[in-house]
Image: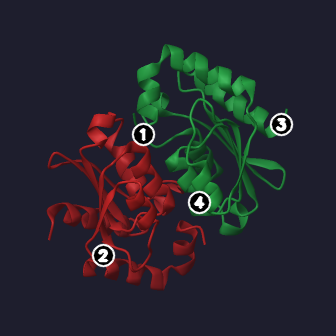
Chain colours: A red, B green
Amino acid sequence: MDKFLRAAIDEARQGMAEGGIPIGSVLVIDGEIVGRGHNRRVQQGSAVLHAEMDCLEQAGRLTAADYRRATLYSTLSPCDMCSGAVLLYGIPRVVVGENSTFQGPEGYVRSRGVEVVVVDDAECRELMAQFIAANHALWNEDIGE
Amino acid sequence: MDKFLRAAIDEARQGMAEGGIPIGSVLVIDGEIVGRGHNRRVQQGSAVLHAEMDCLEQAGRLTAADYRRATLYSTLSPCDMCSGAVLLYGIPRVVVGENSTFQGPEGYVRSRGVEVVVVDDAECRELMAQFIAANHALWNEDIGE
């Protein structure tokens, strides 16, 4: 497996171990991980720290030139908010672990010039399937439903 | 002036007083302000706490039913990220202080069923004009340019 997707899954598993929603993300620039994150709705009572947002926050303030060489990895298809962050910063490439549990606005993101690669990884799917089966209401809250 | 836009401007001024980017936001449900925020890029070294995101975070974890009765006020047209947060949570109405300094994806947001009201408020415009004249690089960083 791609080592960066592996790192994102490790973040998801860390979130799960904390009692949180098992979605993880890493930001990669020039072959190096510059930010890591996982969903913190439960852990911090956060309405905005989806995995991708937490990852971008952990990466810190970067220049536009940095973002334009970056790839954002996420174990799950980024929602409207996280996709919007990709568009704001002009991140040119997103690698998605799976999009069968949930699919964000991938078509719109592609129409704005972003490359979206969907790996369809079984481990990512299984993490979410187990989580949602046991935490349906929490999952719905996380996606605004 | 609409008292909620006034509250958003007060948030923007608080951010400016802290040395930050003068953009403010409030979230209103059933005629009450349930969250307030301002841009915290400078104050917290944050890449994700635009005013609207900070406001949603301060409002805390809400139910979908809460968001669907909400109006988000912002002194400036919400960027891709903040617009995405509106779409994620199904917030049906956004009131924008001004969109001449910067315009987010208002057309796309409207196409997704959100009412976007642009007030074109002179005080909001003036806050940004003064700030950008003195902080051009910081402003570009905040909008990914």
The quarter of the picture where residue A2 lies is: bottom left
- The residue positioned 72% from the left and 64% from the top of the image is B68
Label 3 close to label 4 by CB (< 8 Å):
no
Tell me the kind of residue under disc 4.
Leu
Q: How many numbered discs sit on the rendered protein?
A: 4
Give the position of the N terminus of chain B as an image quadrant.
top right
Q: Chain of mark 1?
A: B
**Is residue A126 rendered to the left or right of residue A49?**
left
Q: Which mark is residue A124?
A: 2
Q: Label 1 to label 2, Cα distance in Å?
A: 26 Å
Between disc 4 and disc 1, whose residue precedes? 1
Secondary structure beneath dot 4 equals: helix
Could you tell me residue B119's position as x and y percent?
Answer: 76, 37
Estimate the spatial distance between the alpha carbons at disc 3 and disc 1, rounded to whole Å: 29 Å
Report the disc number at residue B87: 4
Count residues near mark 4 (Cα–Cα under 10 Å), then give few for <14, some for 14-19, many for 20+: many
Q: Earlier in the sequence, mark 3 or mark 4?
A: 3
Mark 3, secondary structure of its residue = helix
Residues at badges 1 and 2 in contact (C-beta under 8 Å)? no
Rounded to the nearest whole Å, what is the CA distance between mark 4 and mark 2?
25 Å
Q: Does the image show residue A89?
A: yes
The answer to whether any part of residue A20 appears in the image is no
User: Which is more toward the observer, A117 or A72?
Assistant: A117
**Do the residues under discs 3 and 1 have CB atoms within 8 angstroms?**
no
Q: Which residue in the structure is indicated by mark 3? A: B3
